[in-house]
Image (cartoon, coloured by chain):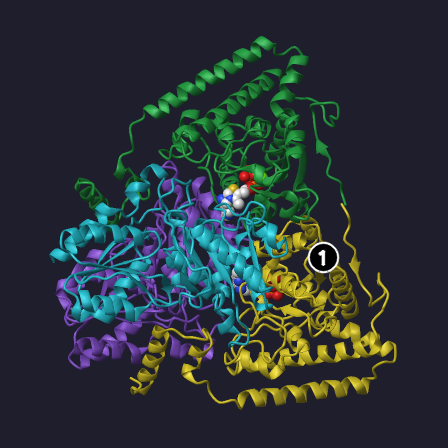
Chain colours: A green, B yellow, C purple, D cyan
Amino acid sequence: METWPLYRVLGPEATDSDRVPDAIKLKIYEDMVLLRSFDEKTITLQRQGRVGTFPPSIGQEAAEIASAHALSKQDWIAPSYRDHGALYVHGVPFENVILFAMGKASSISGDVRALPTSIPIATHLPHAVGLAWAARQRGESVVAMAYFGDGGTSEGDFHEALNFAGVLKAPVIFFCQNNGWAISVPVRLQTASETLAQKALAYGISGVRVDGNDALAVYQAVQAARERALAGAGPTLIEAVTYRLGPHTTADDPTRYRPREELEAWQSQDPLLRLGQYLAERGLLSEADQEAMQARARDWINQAIEAAEATPPVDPTAMFRYLYSDPPLRLRQQMAQLQAALQEEVP
Amino acid sequence: METWPLYRVLGPEATDSDRVPDAIKLKIYEDMVLLRSFDEKTITLQRQGRVGTFPPSIGQEAAEIASAHALSKQDWIAPSYRDHGALYVHGVPFENVILFAMGKASSISGDVRALPTSIPIATHLPHAVGLAWAARQRGESVVAMAYFGDGGTSEGDFHEALNFAGVLKAPVIFFCQNNGWAISVPVRLQTASETLAQKALAYGISGVRVDGNDALAVYQAVQAARERALAGAGPTLIEAVTYRLGPHTTADDPTRYRPREELEAWQSQDPLLRLGQYLAERGLLSEADQEAMQARARDWINQAIEAAEATPPVDPTAMFRYLYSDPPLRLRQQMAQLQAALQEEVP
Amino acid sequence: MAEINMVTAINQTLADLLAQDPRVVLLGEDIGLNGGVFRVTEGLYERFGRERVMDTPLAESGIIGAAIGMAVGGLRPIAEIQFMGFLYPGLDQLISHAGRIRHRSLAALTVPMVVRIPYGGGIRAPEQHADSAEAYLVHTPGLKVVVPSTPYDAKGLLYAALAQDSPVAFLEPIRLYRLGRMEVPEERYQVPIGPLRVAREGRDLSVFAWGAMVPLALRCAERLAEEGVSVEVIDLRTLSPLDIEGIGASVRKTGRAVVVHEAPQTGGVGAEVVATINETAFWWLKAPVARVTGFDLPYPPYAWEEFYLPDERRLLKAVRETLRD
Amino acid sequence: MAEINMVTAINQTLADLLAQDPRVVLLGEDIGLNGGVFRVTEGLYERFGRERVMDTPLAESGIIGAAIGMAVGGLRPIAEIQFMGFLYPGLDQLISHAGRIRHRSLAALTVPMVVRIPYGGGIRAPEQHADSAEAYLVHTPGLKVVVPSTPYDAKGLLYAALAQDSPVAFLEPIRLYRLGRMEVPEERYQVPIGPLRVAREGRDLSVFAWGAMVPLALRCAERLAEEGVSVEVIDLRTLSPLDIEGIGASVRKTGRAVVVHEAPQTGGVGAEVVATINETAFWWLKAPVARVTGFDLPYPPYAWEEFYLPDERRLLKAVRETLRD
Ligand SMILES: Cc1ncc(C[n+]2csc(CCOP(=O)(O)OP(=O)(O)O)c2C)c(N)n1
Ligand SMILES: Cc1ncc(C[n+]2csc(CCOP(=O)(O)OP(=O)(O)O)c2C)c(N)n1
Ligand SMILES: [Mg+2]
Ligand SMILES: [Mg+2]
C-alpha cells in the first residue's frame, strides 16, 4: 500500500518547504492568537452562564485558521460546530459567534459564503458537493470546503459525499481535522484504517495527510487542493492531524477518558508556540509584537462581548419569521396564540 | 498503490491453483445448471402473469452458487433480492422461491440461517456485522456473509457496516457481485475508484478481487475469507467481477442502456460454459451427464412450480399474524374490520 | 390540447423547465439513458445532456444532500427518489437540513428544490416498492408536500413547486401514472400549493383523499349518488401546508366526514385531518369522522395487497356507517 | 427503598440486566469509559467490559443496523442514540428493518432490541439536541414506543422492554433525568407496555401528556384544583401501541380533553390522540379537543425555547378555553 507521508513545514522534521508569503503568515498567526483568546474567554462566559454550551478549538488553531486563509472569499465553506475560527476568517465577526453561543443568532451573518454550522455530524458533506457542483455549473471558479472531524469519517454521509464528489470530479475539499477524539472515542475505535487520508482511495480521489498543528503546512495543503480542484482534477480529502487540547465542549470532562500523558505530549506541539517560534526565529515577530497582538485580541474580544450582550432580548415571535417566505395559516395562528398567551399573567 | 490482482482458477490466465475437491465442483456445477434453468423458467412464468417482478441471476451463477457452497450451514447469510441462488444452496427450496415471487411467502423458510431478502440496497450489511458479532459473543464458530451488488457500495450503510466490522474485527464477509451495472448505471458512474476491492483499505480490512464467473476461484476466495474470519483476522470485502447477462428484473429493458458488444463479450465468459468445459476436459462430466443434469433440473423445477401453484390462495387476514406476538387492540380491530368488509358484496 | 397521462404531463413539464431555466438540473438513480424506471424522464438526457440530467450513484442521502447544496448554491435541483420506500436513508437530509436551513440561517439562505417521489401501492411490486410515507414529511417543518391526482394538477403543481423558495416533496401516485388521460393545456400554468380541490361537490358527507385514493373516492361517490346520497370528494392535493380552512368549510357544510389513505392508520395524515376537523368544524359534526386506511402493518407481500389497500367495499361501508350515525 | 432520579433508575436497571442475562449488550457513542453524555451508563463499562458495553463508531444507521443483526442472532442489544435529533440517519434501519423483519420472515425471526433515545427540550442545548421525533416512530409499524416520566416507570418500562420480542424505542425525557427523585423498589418489576397511567384523577377534563409534559400537566391540574376545576392527567407512557381504550374511557368520563406535547403540532402524536378520541368518545365530547404543542417550526435557538415549548401559560389557557365551550 501507498504510505501516507505527513506533510510538515515547521520544525526539524519538515518534509515540505515553506512557500507562504510573510504577510499571510503574520495574519494567520494573529488570527490564531485571536481565536485562542476568544475560546478561553468564551469558556469563562459559559461558566458564568452568559453563553450556552460551547465547543472550543484550543489546540486546533492552525488547522482552523490556516485552512480558511487558503481560500478565496468567493469559495463556499460548510462548517461543523467547532469551526467558528474558520467562519471568522471567512467573514463572520466574533460578535456574531457570541450571539450564536447565546442562542440568539444564526452561526452565519452577512453575505459570507458559508452554510450555517451543521450540528449533525458529517451531514453537511453532501452539501459541499452540491455547492461545488453548482458553482461549476454556473461557471464560477470557486471551490467548496467542508470542515469535519475524525468521528465524522464513520458516518454514511461522509462516504456518500466523497463518492459523489469522485464521480462528479467536483471542485470540493474535504477538510478533516483528526484531533484524536470524537468526544470520548479515540480514533483507533473509530476506524481500523491506519490513516484517515487513505480513505480517499475508496473514491478514486486525492488524499493528503498534513501536520495539522503546522499552520504553514495546512495552508499549503489546502492551497494545493484548491488549485487541483480548480484545474478540474477533482476533490481532495485532507487529513489534518491535530489534537483537541481542551474539552469536547464546555459540557464535557475529558479527564474521564483521556490519558494525561497524551495531553501533555500534545501540549508541547501547541500550534501557537510552533508558529510563534518560527516567526520569532525569522525575525518576523518580536516579543513586543506578540504582546501587542495578544492585548489587541483581548480588547477586540471584550468589545465583541460587550456588543453582543448589549443586544436586546429576542422578540418571542421572531422565530416565526424565518421558516417560510409565505407562512401558512396554521403557523400564523400559532404565532397569534403565542402572542395571546404572552398577554396572560405568568402563573 | 497496491494493485488488485484478479484471482482466477479457470482458463489460460489462471493466477491461482485449483484446490476444490471434485465432488464439490460437480455439486456446484449441478446447482448452477439448476439456477439457470430456474431463472429461465421463472422469466417465462412472469411473462404469463403467474409470478410478479423477478430478478434473474443469469450470468452470475458462479458467484451465487460457489460462494454459498463455501459456507457451512451454520453460517448466516444476508441476501439481496437477486440471491435466491445462494438461498437455495443454503437451504431454501425453489418451491419457496416461487411462492415468494408469487407474493405469497417469505423469501426464507424452515430454519435456514438466513435473513429474508433485503430489498433496500446495502441496508442489510450492518445486520451481517451484528449477526457475526452475536455468533462470536455466543462462542459459535461461524461467519456471516452479506450479498450485494456494485451499486450497493455507494450507500452509506455499506460504509458504516464495513467500518464497524473493521473496528470489531467481526467474522463477516462482504460479498459484492460487481455485475457491471446497477440497473442502468454502469460502475464507472457509480464510483471513481478503480476497483471495488480497494475500498477495503478505507476500513483496514482485507480486500480481494476475484473472477466472479470462475466458480472455483469464487469458492476458494470465500473459503479463504471464512478461514481468516474464524481465525480472528477480521472481515473481508470480496469483489466478484461478473456480469448480469439478463435484465435487471423482468420489468427492465437493458437494450435501452447497454451496449450490445459488451453483452456479447461477456456471453463468451458464461460461467456455466467455463466450468462445464473444465469438468469435461478433466473427464469429470460427460456430455450425457450434462444432458441428464439439465433434464433433472427441468423436472425438479416443474415439480416445484406445480407444488407452488397448488397452494391455496392466501387467507386475507393472515397478514395480521406476523408483526407482533401480541397484536394490539387496534390491529385486532382492523382485522375485524377487514373480515366484516369481506362479507359485503363486491360493489 | 392533447389528452395525456400523468407520466407524459410530468415529462413535458420537466422538459420545459429544463429548457426555460438553465438553473434547473435533474438528479437521481437511472433517470438518464434509462429515462427513469417509470420513464418519467424519458428523452431528457438525450436532449439536455449529462450535466443537466444526472445519473447519480446509488445513495439517497447523497442525492438529497447534494441537491440541498445545489439549491443553496443557486441551482434549482429536481431530485428523484426511485420509490418512496427508498426515501428513508435520505430522510435525515430532509429533516435536518432541507427543512431547516432557511430557519437556521434566519432566512439568509434558501433551499429551493423539489424531490420527486413515486409512491403508493396497487401494482404488485416487490416489497418496499409500495410504501406511502407522507406522514413523515408532513410532520417535518419547513417542507411542503404535494400530491397530484390528475395529469392537469401534476403539471400545474410541478410548475408551482419549482417557483417556491422552500423545498417541496412532490409525490407521484404510481398507480395513476398511466391510468387516465385528460386534456392538459400546453402552456405553463401553476396549480397553487396550499388550496385543496373540490373534486366533486356534495352535501351529505365529505370524503378527504389524495393520490390514488381520489379516483376511488369518486367511484364511491358516484355509486352513492345512485342511492341518493350526495358525497363531496375533496382532493387535498397539498398535504403540507394543509388547507385547514378548506377542510373546515367542507365539513361545516356536510357535517360528516371520512378520510381515506393508503398509509397505516396510526399517526397517518388522516389523524391530522381528523384533528383539523375537530378544530375547525367540531360544532357542525353529526358523527365521528371515520378513517379508511392501510392497516397498521408494513405493506404486505402482493398476494395480500388487495386486502391491505382501501377499496370500494371498505370505503362504502365507512361512508354508510358515518351517514347512519 | 432509596430515593433516586431517572438517570440512576435507568443505570441500575441496565446494570442488573447486564448482570442477569449474558445476551444483553449495550452499544452506542460514548457509552463506555465516558459513561454516556448524560452518565446513564456510568460505571457499566468498568464493570462489564468492552464486549458488553461497546463504544461504537459515530454512525447511527450502523448502530441500529448492527443491533438488529445482534438481536436476530440471539443477543439482546440495547442501543443508545445520543440525542433524538441524531436518530434521523438511523431511521431507515428502524423503518425498513427493525419494524419489518418479523413480518417479512412471517415470524420466523424476531428482533428483540431496545433503542434508548434521550429526547426533548428545555435544557438550553445547541441546535438539534432538543428534538421530539416520536411521531415518526409511532407511525412506523412493528415498533413499540415507550416514554417514562418517572424513575419508577423508567425502571419498570425498561424491564418490560427487554422482555419483548419486538423492537422497542425507549424515549428518555432529558429534562426529567435529574429533576425529581422518588422511591423505587430495588427488586425487578415490569411496568406493562400498553396501558396508560392515570397520573391524577379528575372529572372535568382530561389532559393527555407524556415525558416532560407530565409534570407540567400536573402543575396545571393542581393550580386549577385551587379554582375548583378537576383535571384528570393521563401519562400515556406507551405511545405505540396507544391505549385507545384507556384514552376513550377517560374522555367518556370527563367529556373534554387537551393534548400536550413538545413536538410540532401538525402530524404530531397529538393528532392521533385527537383522532382516537373522535373514534372512542365522540358522543361524549362537550367541546373540541385542544392541542398545546411545539409550533410547526424546527426547534429554535435556545433564546426562544421558553416560548417554543408548551408552558403553564399556554396549557392553562387551553384548558380554560376548553372548559368554557
Ligand atoms: C449524527 C450525530 N450523531 C451524534 C452527534 C453527537 N456528537 C456531537 S460531537 C460528537 C463527536 C464528534 O467527533 P469528531 O467528528 O471527531 O469531531 P470533533 O468534535 O472532535 O471536532 C458526537 C458524537 C452529532 N452531533 N451528530
Ligand atoms: C435504498 C434503495 N434505493 C434504490 C433501490 C432501487 N433499486 C433496486 S435494484 C437497484 C440497482 C442495484 O444495483 P446493484 O447494487 O449493482 O445490484 P444488482 O441489481 O446489479 O444485483 C436500484 C437502484 C433500492 N432497492 N434500494
Ligand atoms: Mg475529533
Ligand atoms: Mg450491479
Residue A66 position within the rendered picture, expressed as x and y whole percent measured from the top left: 58, 26
Q: Disc 1 residue type?
A: Gly
| Above or below, comparing residue D1 to residue B108 in the picture | above
Question: Does residue D44 show up?
Answer: yes
In this picture, residue D291 sits left or right of residue C110? left
> Could you classify mark 1 by the number of other residues whose Cα lies within 10 Å: few (under 14), some (14-19), or many (20 or more)?
many
Residue under circle 1? B234
A286 vs B263, nearest the viewer: A286
Mark 1 within 8 Å of ligand 1, using the beta carbon: no
Locate residue C244, reporting x and y percent.
22, 57
Q: Look at the image and tell me in which quarter the C terminus of chain B lies.
A: bottom left
What is the chain identity of the residue bearing mark 1? B
Disc 1, SS: loop
For image coordinates 47% across by 53% down, the residue present is D87
The relative height of residue B3 versus residue D135 in the rendered view (above or below) is above
Instruction: Find residue B147 and report its image quarter.
Output: bottom right
Residue D55 visible in the current orientation: no
Along the line of sight, the residue nearer the viewer: A71 or A317: A317
Q: Indicate the position of residue B23 as horizontal and vertical percent values.
A: 82, 79
Q: Is residue C168 above or below residue B284?
A: above
Q: Quadrant of residue B244?
A: bottom right
Q: Nearer the viewer, residue B294 or D153?
A: D153
Identity of the residue furthest to the left in this view: D324
Query: What residue do we see at 57% from left, 56% from top?
Result: B157
Residue at image coords 30%, 46% = D309
